[in-house]
Image: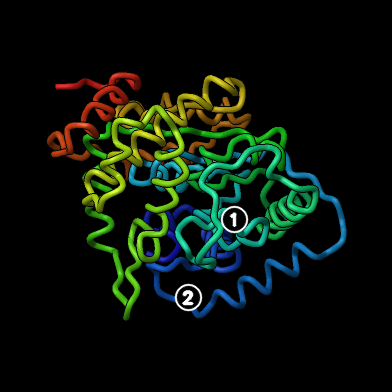
Amino acid sequence: MIAQMDRDYLASGFGLSARRVASYLLYEGRPLTTRGRFINPLVFAWLKSLAALPGEPAVDRPLFITGLGRSGTTILGILFSLHKQVGYLNEPKALWHVIDARQDINGNYSDAGARFRMGATDATPNMCLRARRLFSRYLTLTGSTRVVDKYPELIFRVGYVRALFPDAKFIFITRSGADAVPSVVKWSTRLGVQSGEHTDDWWGRNDIKWHYLRDQLILDDPAYESVWQLVAADLDHANRAALEWIVTMREGLAQEQRYPDAVIRVAYETLIADPAGELVRLQQQCSLDPDPRVLDYARKRLYDNPAKGWPELHPAVDVLFRDTMTKLGYDVP
C-alpha cells in the first residue's frame, strides 16, 4: 500500500488521499528498509528550501504519537489522518533530519552522532525556527490546521520537542510486551534487508540503533544494572526487543508523570475493545472536534490479534519485563 492507504481509506475522499500522498512523497523520506530511496535527494532539497524561507510562523498545538513501534502507533496515526483538520506525517525522519541530524538513531541518513534521549537544552534557536517553518508550511501546503506526527522514539525527547513547540501534546500508546516483542522480531525478520556488507533491519544499519539504545539508555542507567553484563554480549532479537519495550514503557510512564497535561496515555488493547470511546476521548483531549470518518474507518480496520505466548527471555531480562508489565497493569503469569 502506498502511504498506508487501502481501499477503504481511498473511499474516504480524494482530498484526504491527496493530502496523505503529499505527506508521503514530500516530507517523510524513505528509510533504509524501504524502496524508492532515489527520491530522498529531492525530498531533502525541498525540505531545506522550506526551512530557509524567511519568516517566523507559528504551529498550533502539534500532536506526536509515541511509544514503541509495533504497538498500534501506525494505525492510530492513520485514524487521525482521516480527521478533517489533521495533516498526518508517518515517521518523517527526513524532515526531522533537516531540523536536527542527531535524531537519526537508525542511521538512515547519518552513520554517527545520534542521540536517543534529548532534553530542552538540546534545542537551539535555529532548530526551533527550522521546526516551526517546516511544520507550519506543511500545514499550509496540505490545507490542514493541526499536525499529527507519528514518531515513536520522541517519547525520549519530550522536553526537547516541548522546547520547539511549547504547546505540543504527546499520545503515548502502550501494548502488552507479550504481544509487542514477537511483533518486533517478526518485523525485523520479514522486512530486514541485506545489501553487501550492510544489514538494515529493526536495529538500524548494522545494529546502530541497538548500540545507541544499549550505550545511552541501558548502560547509562543504574536501574538496568542487572543486565549490564548481559547486554555487553550479542543478544538475540527477542531479548533486544524486550529491553527496548521495557525502557520505552518506563520512559513513557515517567514522562506522563512529569508532564500530566501534555502526555496522553492510551492502551492498544483498550483502543481495540472500545474504539468509539477511546477515539472520542483522544480527539477531545487533543482539542479536535470528533470526526465521524475516524470512527467509521476504525470499525472497518481495527481487529484483535490472537494473544501471543510469553516470550522466552534471559532470566535477568524477564525480571524487568514482568515488573514493567505489572506497572502498566497487564496480567503476568
Q: Which residue is mark 2?
A: 37
The C terminus appears in which quarter of the rendering? top left
Does residue 140 appear in the picture of this structure? yes
- Residue most extreme to the front: 229
Residue 271: image quadrant is top left
Q: Horizontal and vertical percent for residue 30?
A: 48, 68
The three-letter code of the residue at mark 1 reads Arg
For the point 24% across and 50% down, which residue is it? 235
Q: Which residue is mark 1?
A: 102
Q: Please give left or right for residue 224 compared with residue 24 in the image.
A: left
Q: Please give left or right for residue 151 compared with residue 207 in the image.
A: right
Residue 319 vs 190, above or below: the answer is above
The three-letter code of the residue at mark 2 reads Arg
Q: Nearer the viewer, residue 116 or 53?
A: 116
For the point 67% across and 36% down, which residue is it? 162
Check contact, mark 1 vs mark 2: CB within 8 A.
no
Q: Nearer the viewer, residue 98 or 218?
A: 218
Q: Horizontal and vertical percent for residue 185?
A: 24, 51
Does residue 297 appear in the picture of this structure? no
**Label 1 or label 2, whichever comes before in sequence order:** 2
How dense is the environment of label 1, judged by Cα within 10 Å: few (below 14), some, or many (20 and up)?
some
Q: Nearer the viewer, mark 1 or mark 2?
A: 1
Helix, strand or loop at mark 1? helix
Residue 36 vs 84, above or below: the answer is below
How dense is the environment of label 2, judged by Cα within 10 Å: few (below 14), some, or many (20 and up)?
few
Q: Horizontal and vertical percent for residue 275?
A: 37, 30
Residue 126 vs 261, above or below: the answer is below
